[in-house]
Amino acid sequence: MDILQQEKVRKYEEFVDCRLKPDLVRAIGERDKVFQQQKIFADLKKNIENLEKNNVTRLRTLLNIGSEVYAQADIPDTRRIFVNVGLGFHVEFTWSEAIQFISVKEAKLEKEIEEYTNVIASIKAQIKMVCEGIRELLQLNE
């Protein structure tokens, strides 16, 4: 193998290690964050539906105030709730309005997950293609 081939192989390996693999890790991390948001909204929707089904208008619960320290909270009227809509804003919703918002948000999150999945598949295909190019340069058998 001559020096030119060695340099090409080194550049391809460097491209995979320094560009494609970090991009893949970043995309997977971003998709995991969206999965986390999706789970939070699904849990909220389930809780609202349980409140509606059981017709709960007053609630007593424990509230995590940080560092696993809990305080008892008394909620005199559960028919209106505040939902984090993003960018630090919370909006007061009725149960039905909250469920409608959550349905729209879940659809948006599903699209984001699909987009990240496509990006991840594309990066994996690029890594495979570059590795195949390296294999051809080295004239190795599969």
Image (spheres, helix red, strand yellow):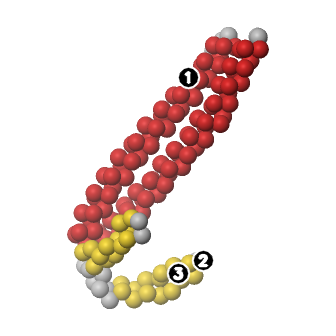
C-alpha separation, residue under disc 3 versus residue under disc 1: 50 Å
What is the number of the mark on residue 129?
1
Q: CA distance from mark 2 to mark 1?
A: 47 Å
Front residue of 67/61: it is: 67
The quadrant of the picture occupied by the N terminus is: top right
Q: Residue at x 68, y 25 (%)?
A: 11
Residue drawn 59% across the image and 23% down it: 130
Task: Report x, y in % for residue 38.
Answer: 40, 57
Q: Amino acid at mark 1?
A: Met
Foreground mark, 3 or 1, reads 1
- Give the structural element (helix, strand or loop) at label 3: strand
The amino acid type found where label 2 is placed reads Ser
Q: Where does the image place residue 107, in percent across and percent down from the top left?
A: 31, 52
Which residue carries the number 3 mark? 65
Give the residue number, with chain letter if any, for mark 2.
Answer: 67
Point out residue 86 in the picture as x, y percentages from the top left corner: 39, 64
**Can residue 90 be seen?**
yes
Which of marks 1 and 3 precedes in the sequence? 3
Relative vertical location of residue 55 with respect to residue 111 in this rendering, above or below: below
Q: Residues within 10 Å of mark 1 (few under 14, many from 20)?
A: few
Judge whether 8 appears above or below 69 on screen. Answer: above
Where in the figure is residue 59, as x and y percent of width and height? 36, 84
The earlier-in-sequence mark between 2 and 1 is 2
